[in-house]
Image (cartoon, grey):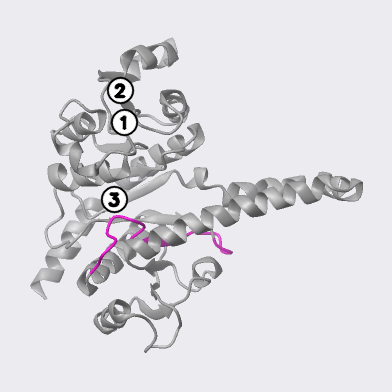
Amino acid sequence: MLKIAIDVMGADNGVTPIVQGVLQALESREFIAIIVGDEAQITPLIPSHLQSRVEIVHCIDYIRMEESASSATKRTESSIFKATEILKNGGADALVSPGHSGATMSLATLKIGRIKGVSRPAICTTMPNITDKPSIILDAGANTDCKPEYLVDFAIMGYEYAKNVVGFENPRVGLLSNGEEDNKGNELTKATFKLLKSFDFFKGNVEGRDIFNGSVDVIVCDGFSGNLVLKASEGVAFAISNVLKKEIKSCICSMFGALFLGGVFKRLKKKMDHSEYGGAPLLGVQKVVIISHGSSNARAIECAIYQALHAISSDICAKLTTTFAQKSLE
């Protein structure tokens, strides 16, 4: 049975919602959860019928959000260090962490190691669009300063993830820029465009709006831009949701209309809710690592675990290893 290590320390809302998410996943999928964190807080939350599928690795130290990611390498008793060690030593098949993302990325890169040929690992996040499948963006924050060759590697990893994990038959990859014309962009995107032109999957420059209209499946950018897009999109979704609620409550006719459209609103909320997407895989490291938002609720953690299980079953790390081995021979 597959084993998933979950770092439950360091999230914004404490241990409880993270453990609840793990339990929800255990109720619907067959796996063993290795929960890393404060045993005194974790144990009372585990129901008797799930205890045989839960292993608790006790530790109380964790990397605070305000601390430097570099401190994680020295904090051998911290939850993320222990969870990463478990994954490295084969005690787990994947790692899920809603804690300090910088610490998770740093330890995964140093302890688990990069896939040979990958210049830099990248955070690969999914976002809703008008089609049935999400848009994929990378890098979403792992590398704020990038070279053109990094973005080429992101494009290759995004293509493989879209094809093998998300299920796109022939993923289309676009380069995020300030215009669709070939000559648009800054020095980084212009240089990257020249390198990507030789790839069959590359469809050219795309603008921010193309993330949501389904014109391409994978959007490549540096981590600084990707993180800005991600946070701005979360803010817009939150604002629209609140505006809709206020408008519906503002008049009796709107309230009656909302009753008839309840199912539509419910489906819209589910599609726009970042919790439904769980977390973001760190592509380019040798094992499956899922980085979840610090404010993750139980549903987000549940979905992050599903994402980890799906990534394992698709054998994405091995496929990326093969792809980059072939690339080095070209």
Image-quadrant location for residue 59? top left
Q: Nearer the viewer, mark 3 or mark 2?
A: 2
Which stretch appears magenta? 129-146
Q: Is residue 141 magenta?
A: yes
Residue 40, given in percent of the width and then of the height, sits at: 35, 12
Q: Give the alpha-carbon distance from disc 2 to disc 1, as whole Å.
A: 7 Å
- The kind of secondary structure element at disc 3 is strand
Q: Which mark is residue 282?
A: 3
Q: Is residue 154 magenta?
A: no
Q: Residues within 10 Å of mark 1 (few under 14, many from 20)?
A: many
Q: Which mark is residue 180?
A: none
Q: Is residue 116 left or right of residue 245?
A: left
Q: Is residue 259 left or right of residue 207?
A: right
Q: Kindly identify the residue that appears in the image at 33 percent across and 49 percent down.
A: 281
Q: Residues within 10 Å of mark 2 (few under 14, many from 20)?
A: many
Image-quadrant location for residue 54? top left
Residue topped by disc 2: 37
Q: Residues within 10 Å of mark 3 (few under 14, many from 20)?
A: many
Q: Kindly identify the residue that appears in the image at 31 percent across and 31 percent down.
A: 7
Pick whichever of labels 3 and 2 is earlier in the sequence.
Answer: 2
- The kind of secondary structure element at disc 2 is strand
Residue topped by disc 1: 7
- The kind of secondary structure element at disc 1 is strand
Pick whichever of labels 3 and 1 is earlier in the sequence.
Answer: 1
- Residue lying furthest front: 66
